Image (cartoon, rainbow, N blue to C red):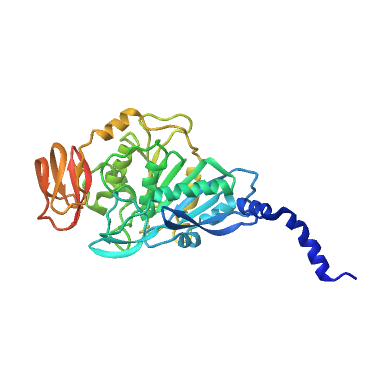
Amino acid sequence: MKSNLFYLVLFLLPLSIFGNSFNTSINSHNACVNGKLKKTILVDGFTREYIIHVPVIYDHSIQVPLVFMLHGTGGSGDDFYENHGWKELSEKENFIVVYPSALRYRIFTDGENKTITKWNTSPDAEWVFQAGETGADDIKFLRRIIEEMKQDYKIDAKRIYLNGFSNGGAMASKCAVEMSDVLAAVAENAASFYIDTVYIPKRKLPVLFQVGNKDYGPGNIGPEIPLIYLDTLLSQAGIPIQNGKHFRIANNHIRNFNLQSSYTIVGDTNQVVVATYLPKNPGPGTGYEFKFILVKALAHAYPNGENHFFDAPKVHWNWMQKFMLENTVATKDEKNEALELVSFYPNPSQNKIQFDTMTEWNIMNLNGESIKKGFGNEIDISNLPPAIYFLKMENKLRKLIKN
């Protein structure tokens, strides 16, 4: 009778014939991995981490969509993997989810210094890095993830979507501009473009912004806004409710994506209302749009059908999957419009800022209240306390940082 050792050797022997090529094939396509997988990648000297979820029904012979979910301030990819409903939806709809993690920085925000994870949305942010701190290139990180995912899985390059919450929502707005050449659609939640400036996306793509009517930012509370007021919030500047952010965010998208200023509103004012903006010049194929969603009884949280009645993953997925990547780029006229804006420097500054031409200017606080105004090609800001301000020139608001 042959020993068990004989059969073990007989079983292992054929595998040795393949050498390293067999193992490489397994690792290359992650053929044995379904469910959760944690990965790291080196980008510009930083070790970056991301988590993926591969549904059980995934078949490497069939192309599938890829969905990014970006966490908020202080979070991680692990947090969002466990708590926000996307991995469960991917099992039903057969797409792969990526949960990247932001790096940890020393920042100045809300009048205090903190050390916390943040997506680098600078300069379009209400916070700044502390002296000596350098933000990583998160756009490069996310693009590298896409490259790796295409190597390891059968990804449909025309169906790559990105979703983000809070600081991740602000990062999503940055991605809608700087990654619009590879993303089919973007969903921003609870945060978006912060400053009033002009960005020229690589292509104009579908964007959705969602916010709760009780959302006053992380850790803040305030009165619940009746959903019937959405039209007023979107059409009137300077409304003190939530610092007028609804109007600013809507108009930032109108300007950046060349949308019509008019919109239609539908929905149930006891649950959810949606404003839809259409492009001035629709693109070929699927075209694009901007949706502004206001959700009742929602504070600063990502609703998933369990922590709130609104099932954001399901709603966002149903909307995103209508769109596919189109090969369109910014027009020459749009690029020229950005170049015509007056520039100023340095920013941040301690004592003085200068313009590249004579212009009218107005420095305002974050509530939109004028602090000082004038005309010329420089401003003495030495008497201003260190803070973040708005600088208005040519009817455009830019962020000014006083150190």
User: Residue 26 in the image: x percent, y percent?
Assistant: 65, 53
Q: Check the image and name the residue furthest to the right.
A: 1
Residue at position x 48%, y 37% from top? 325
Q: Determine which quarter of the picture holds residue 342.
A: top left
Residue 286 image point, x, y percent: 48, 33
**Residue 375 placement: quadrant:** top left
* Residue 18 in view, yes or no: yes
Residue at the spot 45% in from the left edge and 46% down from the top edge:
143
Residue 178 versus residue 304 in the image, above or below: above
At a point 73% along the width and 57% down the height, the residue shown is 16
- In the image, 365 versus 263, the foreground residue is 365
Is 16 in front, or is 234?
16
* Figure quadrant of the C terminus: bottom left
Q: Give the percent coordinates (x, y) of residue 307.
A: 45, 61
In the image, is 245 to the left or to the right of 99? Answer: left
Above-or-below relation of 323 to 132: above
Q: Nearer the viewer, residue 375 or 209?
A: 375
Which of 100 and 302 lies nearest the eye of the viewer? 100
